[in-house]
Amino acid sequence: MTGQIFRRLTTTPDVMKIFSDTAMVQAMLDFEKALAFSEAKCKIFDEGFAEIIGSNCKVEKFSIADLSDKSVDHGTIVVPLVRRLIQLVSSSNKSASGWIHFGATSQDVIDTAMVMQLKKAIKVLKKDILRIDSALSTLIEKYGDQVMIGRTLLQPSVPIKFEQKLSGWRSAISRSWDRVEKSASEAMLLQFGGAAGNLSALGVDGEKVRKVLSNLLNLDMSNEVWHVHRDRFVALCSSLSILVGALGKTALDISLLMQFEVSEVFEKTNLERGRSSAMPHKRNPVGCLIALSAAKRVPHLLATLVDAMPHEHERALGGWQVEWVTIPDIVETTAGSLAAIAGLCENLEIDQEKMKNNLDSLNGLFMSEKVMLELSKKIGKEQASQIISEACSASISKNQHLKDVLQEDIRFMKLIDQSTLDKLMLLE
């Protein structure tokens, strides 16, 4: 796994920071600090002990390299983390060190830290959602009425307004984000169950501590034990995957419209952005590249989480642990896609003249459906389709406008007068 080399290409600095080793360890220490104060408030031990524990819950007092190495022997970073915290606290108060991590387990620490990181990340992602929505609204207002070729199965179909494409992108991304926010609100829960989920070590004080801890960390509580039921996390990541797919659709459309043979829209470039290493004339669609690579990657990461959902009894062996790298990967990749599409939409260049010219180059063929349906009223669809298909073939082979071909077809002109034909060939 690389560090900065490829990771930065696929995400943003803000989200990288949220899921950095330093931020993760600090989130775990924030849990331990809040746990100490919660238990002190519930009179389990002296509040002065909580002050001492909390004062040592600072990531700069820990060696991440050392924690990482030692975690290999334990299958979790929490064991060496707690041991180091005990060492730090013991140096000033041996009695206080005995209350560190009291009644908790590794999963409480890691899951709650993950939730805290996700909560921060969702706020960052929303900023780019707002950028995209604003940019697409501006494009709709400015270019929405422009008529262009609609394309089905990568071939010209009938004329559409550019607004149809822009509004489609905007609506799909907006709907997808609504799903993300809903699933995020359900997943932002405190994890605190102790060894097997029933807070057995805390006895009658367990639920009181849980409520205080929930308030201190500003996290909701679930009504049931959820540490082996990962549906909320998977639902959130599923919603993010759908969002990435919607962003990928936008990127794919734009990249196809950017092809030199089409040239209707452009990802804004400069002398450096998108430069080819071999061909000076090329400017590659970098924003589209990032969003499309995300759309190809995230569904497979999601599949890992879905596959890992069945957890053994009261703690999973492998299924939970696979989340530790997979969930951050999904969120980081989503962030990269969002930022790429936001920047792309804010700087998208539209060639209205090229849209018009591409339509004109079809010699009216895009009106064949409309003309055929009108003719069908006279002679039925099968016969009408035969006549119009022949006219289209003639238009293509002779490079002649469809209207001119139809005017030369006696069968057609006996049934459709010139005035009607003129109206049928008008762009609406």
Image: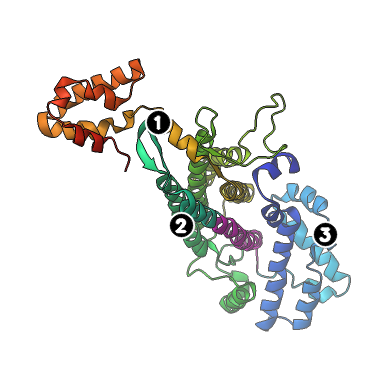
Residue, disc 1: 360
Cα separation, mark 2 vs mark 3, equals: 38 Å
Residue, disc 3: 62
Residue 178, percent across and down?
Answer: 46, 59
Most extreme residue toward the left is 379
SS of the residue under disc 1: helix
Quarter of the image that includes the C terminus:
top left
Sequence order check, earlier mark of 1 and 2 = 2
The residues colored magenta run 104-131
**Which quarter of the figure has residue 199?**
bottom right
Picture layout, residue 172 above or below residue 280: below
Name the residue at 47% across, 62% down: 182
Most extreme residue toward the front is 419
Residue closer to the observer: 274 or 221: 274
Residue closer to the observer: 146 or 307: 146
- For badge 2, the amino acid type reads Arg
**Which quarter of the figure has residue 60?**
bottom right
- For badge 1, the amino acid type reads Asp
Q: Is residue 329 left or right of residue 235?
A: right
106 inside magenta stretch: yes
Q: Is the magenta stretch mostly helix, strand or loop?
A: helix
Sequence order check, earlier mark of 2 and 3 = 3
The number of numbered badges drawn on the structure is 3
Task: Using a 10 Å C-alpha cutoff, classify the residue at mark 2 as few (fewer than 14 neighbours), some (14 to 19) or many (20 or more).
Answer: some
Residue 120, percent across and down?
Answer: 63, 62
SS of the residue under disc 2: helix
Residue, disc 2: 179
